[in-house]
Image: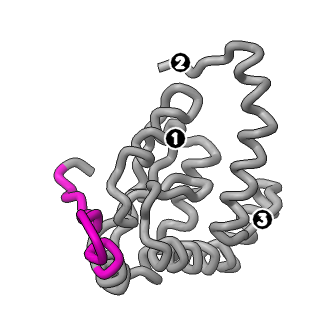
Amino acid sequence: MVAGLTRRSLVLGAAAAPFAASLAGAQNWPSGPIRLVVPFPPGGSTDALARLVQTGLQQRLGVNIIIENKPGASGAAGTTTVAKSPPDGAYTWWGVFAPAGTPKPIVERFNKELAASIREERVTKTLTEGQQMSLVLSTPEELGKFSTAQGKLWGPVVKENDIKGEM
């Protein structure tokens, strides 16, 4: 979820304006292409998975889904791209993560449509039979809890062993 694409943003300043603007923007979302960032090179299993759900997402959301491969630093390059993107639902990362601050209605809608795309018979069959994957469809909250738990589990290992990503 290339060059020349405009970035849309719902981030506004003070008081009640952010809440009102986020809701209004979320109701009109998506208003343009969505960039699905794959933090690995083209041709790998993550890239294939992204392209497998691309058509269903485009049909359900009514906008182009652009697969953008951002390899490097064991996935950190792609993660950084998404983390530094505006929280407008125009960028996602396979997991699927969106920038902090992305309005909840956008996250919920994308999650719903992604899950529906993955449940398509051709996608499910390709993943379970062809790729021997087990599908786990969860809520954004469940993914957040899982990610936090993984960070707590592996963070000390990374720190103890002075493991660093390569750029």
Residue at 50% across / 79% down in the picture? 109
Closer-to-camera residue (120/130): 120
Density class for disc 1 (Cα within 10 Å; few <14, some 14-19, many ≥20) is many
Q: Amino acid at mark 2?
A: Glu
- At label 3, which amino acid type do we have? Leu
User: Which is more foreground, mark 3 or mark 2?
Assistant: 2
User: Which residue corresponds to the image point at 70% horizontal and 79% vertical from the top-left?
Assistant: 121
Q: Quadrant of residue 15?
A: bottom left
- Residue type, mark 1 in image: Pro
In the image, which residues are magenta? 4-20
Q: Is residue 30 visible?
A: no
Residue for badge 3: 135
Q: Earlier in the sequence, mark 3 or mark 2?
A: 3
Percent position of residue 5, x then y:
21, 56
Q: Which residue is painted at 65% across and 72% down in the image?
A: 118
Q: Which mark is residue 39?
A: 1
Graded by Cα atoms within 10 Å as few (under 14), some (14 to 19) or many (20 or more), the crowding at tag 2 reads: few
Residue 46 in view here: yes
Q: Is residue 30 magenta?
A: no
Q: Does dot 1 land on a helix, a strand or a loop?
A: loop
User: Which residue does the numbered mark 2 point to in the structure image?
Assistant: 166
Q: Residues within 10 Å of mark 3 (few under 14, many from 20)?
A: few
The answer to whether the residues at label 1 and label 2 have Cβ atoms under 8 Å apart is no
In the image shown, does 50 or 79 lie closer to the viewer?
79
Instruction: Say what secondary structure mark 2 lies in.
Output: loop
The alpha-carbon separation of the residues under discs 3 and 2 comes to 30 Å
Q: Residue at x 45, y 75 (%)?
A: 106
85 sits left or right of 124 in the view: left
Q: Picture quarter containing residue 101?
A: bottom left
* Mark 1 / mark 3, whichever is N-terminal: 1
- Of badges 1 and 2, the one in the foreground is 2
